[in-house]
Amino acid sequence: MKKPVIDASGVDLTFQTKDAPVHALKDVNLQIDKGDFVSFIGPSGCGKTTLLRCIAALETPTGGSLTVNGLSPDEARKARSYGYVFQAAGLYPWRTIEKNIKLPLEIMGYPKAEMDERVKRVLDLVDLSGFGKKFPWQLSGGMQQRASIARALAFDADILLMDEPFGALDEIVRDKLNEELLKLWDRTGKTICFVTHSIPEAVYLSTKIVVMSPRPGRITDVIESPLPRERPLEIRDTPEFIEIAHRVREGLREGHNT
């Protein structure tokens, strides 16, 4: 029996503050398999990003167990098991796009020839060939986010953690990047964990949708998507898509009432 890539069992997280403890996550149980595209959706402050940060070893659970590729999150971080894409592109304005992408490779000590090859490959993957010599301020917001994704892909981790990367973009750009992200996922076969506030985005992208309740964040539903892997934007008008979106909406509503 194959082991899940990410395995959370009874995960709790309580932050100690001056006023009172803040219960961010409570009894989170979740298994994510290799090649899954999993979206986390829930109201603001429900712990979606906190759960992603626990997977990335940026936060430490106060209860339960969590493994990534069979390792502790901290061991998985040291093994370079994942790339992380933040809400903002986070590109250094004084470095060109290719030098921004090279930064983690430089820190990891890759030889120059291999860095150059990897940068070329990931720029091709995100359709930014020819823009490597540009600076971030010369690119649109959508292109900057693609460059941020390229940076996360550069060291070829099996897992991609994405914290609402398209939330600040307009709907037209967001639709285009959703399409491109699905193509990228299909080409690379990576496991993707994706935080979003958008029901249509979660349904369009995912093989599995994780619905979370208001704080303390609990998983109230895990929806396995029956949609085909090939998904044109027009699929959002189909009865199947609308039915899944309705179930997500109902799950969010029930989470507020529990």
Image (cartoon, rainbow, N blue to C red):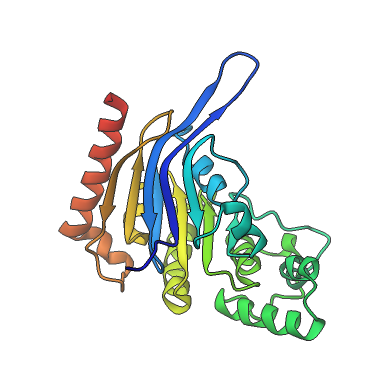
In front here: 76 or 256? 76
Q: Residue furthest left?
A: 239
Left or right: 194, with 129 as reference point = left
Q: Is residue 11 above or below residue 209?
A: above
| Residue 109 on image: x %, y % | 80, 72
| Residue 1 on image: x %, y % | 32, 68
Left or right: 188, with 236 as reference point = right
In front here: 240 or 162? 162
Q: Residue furthest front?
A: 1
Image-quadrant location for residue 204: bottom left
Image-quadrant location for residue 82: bottom right
Pick the quarter of the image with the C terminus.
top left
Q: Evaluate whether residue 130 shows in this view.
A: no
Q: Is residue 89 above or below residue 184?
A: above
Image-quadrant location for residue 235: bottom left
Q: Residue furthest top?
A: 19
Residue drawn at the location 48% of the way across and 76% of the way down = 188
Q: Evaluate whether residue 47 shows in this view.
A: yes
Q: Is residue 36 above or below residue 117?
A: above
